[in-house]
Amino acid sequence: MEHGSFTNEREGTFTLAEEDHTLANAVRFMLNQDPRVTLAGYSIPHPSLECVNIRVQTTGDPAREVLKDACQELMIMNRHVRSVFDKAVAEFKAEQEQKKQREIDSMDIETH
Amino acid sequence: MANEVEEEEMKRIVTETEKTFAKNFNIFDLPDVAPGLPPHLELQRTRVFCKNDAPIHTTSVSYSGAYNAVGENNSVKLESFSENFRVEVISTSPDGMELEFDMIGIDAAIANAFRRILLAEVPTMAIEKVFVANNTSIVQDEVLAHRMGLIPIVANPRIFEYLSENDQPNEKNTIVFKLHAKCAKGEVRRKVLTNELIWLPNGSELVKESGVSTSKPKTFTSFCRSQDSFPEFADNPIAPSYPDILIAKLGPGQEIELEAHAVKGIGKTHAKWSPVATAWYRMLPEVILQKEFEGEQAQKLVRACPAKVFDIEDMGNGRKRTKVARPRDCTLCRECLREEFGEPKPKAKGEDKSKREWIDNVALRRVKNHFIFKIESTGSLPPDVLFTEAVKILEDKCERVIADLS
C-alpha cells in the first residue's frame, strides 16, 4: 500500500503488511545504495502491528520505481549469494570426502 | 594606449582552452592524487575500532553519496558485489548438523536478514496438538504437551502444507505419533524417552466420540493414503531427531497414553518451529601491533591474552618479539588494552606514561563486511539446506513487494 501525493511522485511512504526489520532493513540498505535516493528509512508504527512503513524520497525518479528496483536488486543479490554458497558447500564436501578417502588409504598401508 | 596593452596581455594570459580546462578541472584527476578514499577514511569505513572504553565507527556507511566530497562513489554496484562476494566453509560437526562458514563482502543488513529468517521464518514440523487418553504420571497434561511440542522432528517440511483453521487434518499436513508408556506396579521408576514415540503413517487411531453410531468409526484425522507410500518416507521413517530426549519419568503404577499431531509452522509463531538451536554471526577480529613488542614486554602481552592470540617469535640474535598468531580466536575482551596489563595496578593515576604508550600500540578491530556465520540445526534439515531456504525466503519477500508495487 502506498501513501503519497498524486502530484509529487518523487516521494512516498509504502506500508508493507506482515513484514518486519528482516526485510525493511535490507531494503533500506539497498535504497541508500542507490544514487537516485535522497532519503530512505523505515519505521514500525507499533510493536503489535504487523507492518512496516518505508519512506522513499528521490532526486526525480518515481519513488515507487526506485523501491521496486531496490527489491529487484536485492533479489538478484540473493540469487548470487545462494549460488556462491552452494558452490562453496559442494567444494567443502568433496574435499572432506577426499580427506576421508586418503585417511582410509594410509590406514591400509599401515596395516599391510 | 596603456589600456590596449593591458587588454592584449589579458588575452594572452587566459586563452579559451585554458578557460575550458579551468571549468573541467578536477583535483582528483591529477596524477599524484591517489585514487580511492584516503587511508584513514577507508579504515573507518571498513573496520570497527575496539577502544579501551567503547567500540567506535560501528555503523556501516550505506549512503551512496557519503564520500562525494573526496570524489568517491560509495554505492555498491551489483557487478562489484558479484565479483567480491565469497563464501568459505570452515567446519561442520561430525553429525553434520552444525556448520560454520565465512561470508565475505556483504553488508550487515543483509547478513542479519538471513540470520533473522533462519531463526523465525524457515518452516519445520512440530507437535501442535496432544490428545491425552490417559496420564497418571506426575507431569501434568499441559506441561507434558508443552514438552512434546519442543521435540525436534526429522521430516522434510517442504513436502507438507500448512494446516489452516478450517482444514481437516490429512496426510499432507499432519504427522501423527503415538506414545504408550507404562511402569508396572512393583517395578523401579523409569524414564520415557523420545524413542518410544511411534509414528502412525495411517493417521490417528483415537476414535472420536459422537452420538450417532455409524458403521465406520471416525478418528481425529482423515488420511486418504498412508504416509508410508510417500517416496520421501519410504526409506527413512519420520521420527524425533534424537532418540534419547527425556519426555517424562514414570513411577510404579503410572501410565501415559497419548497421541501427538505435528503440523507445519514457523518460529515467529512459536519457538518450537524454529529449525535452529541458534544461528549467529560475528565480524572477523583483526589484531594489529603497531610497534614491535620485544623481550619482557612481549612476554607480558602473550600472558595477558586469555584467548591465546599472541605467540613469541624468534628474530635471531636471541631477540624475541610478539606475533599475532591467531587473530580469529580474539574475543575482543580488551584484556591486552588494560592499563595495568600483566602488572599490579599503578599506585597513582597518571603515574606511568610509558604504559599508556603500548596500550595505544595494540589495535583491536573488526572487519565490517566479513561475517563468521554459524548455524546449529535442531536436526530437521541440514544447516546448508536451511541457509539456502532462508535466502529463498528473502527472495520471495522481495518478489512479493515487487508484485504489490506493480
Image: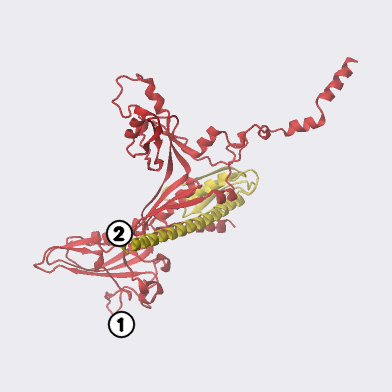
- Colour for chain B in the figure: red
Query: Within 10 angstroms of label 1, few (less than 14), some, or many (20 or more) residues?
Result: few
Q: Which mark is residue B150?
A: 2
Q: In the figure, B36 relative to B174: above or below?
A: above
Foreground of the two, B353 or A5: B353
Q: Residues within 10 Å of mark 2 (few under 14, many from 20)?
A: some
Q: Which three-letter amino acid code belongs to the residue tagged 2? A: Leu
On the question of residue B217 being in view, the answer is: yes
Q: CA distance from mark 1 to mark 2?
A: 34 Å
Task: Name the image quarter holding residue A98.
Answer: bottom left
**Residue that protrudes farthest toward the left in the picture:** B186
**Chain assigned yellow:** A
Residue bearing the label numbered 1: B216
Residue name at image x 52 percent, y 51 percent: A15
User: Looking at numbered disc 1 in the image, what kind of residue is underneath it?
Assistant: Lys
Tell us which disc is closer to us: 1 or 2: 2
Q: Position of residue A75 (x, y in %)?
A: 54, 55
Which label sits on residue A17?
none
- In front of the other: B280 or A84: A84
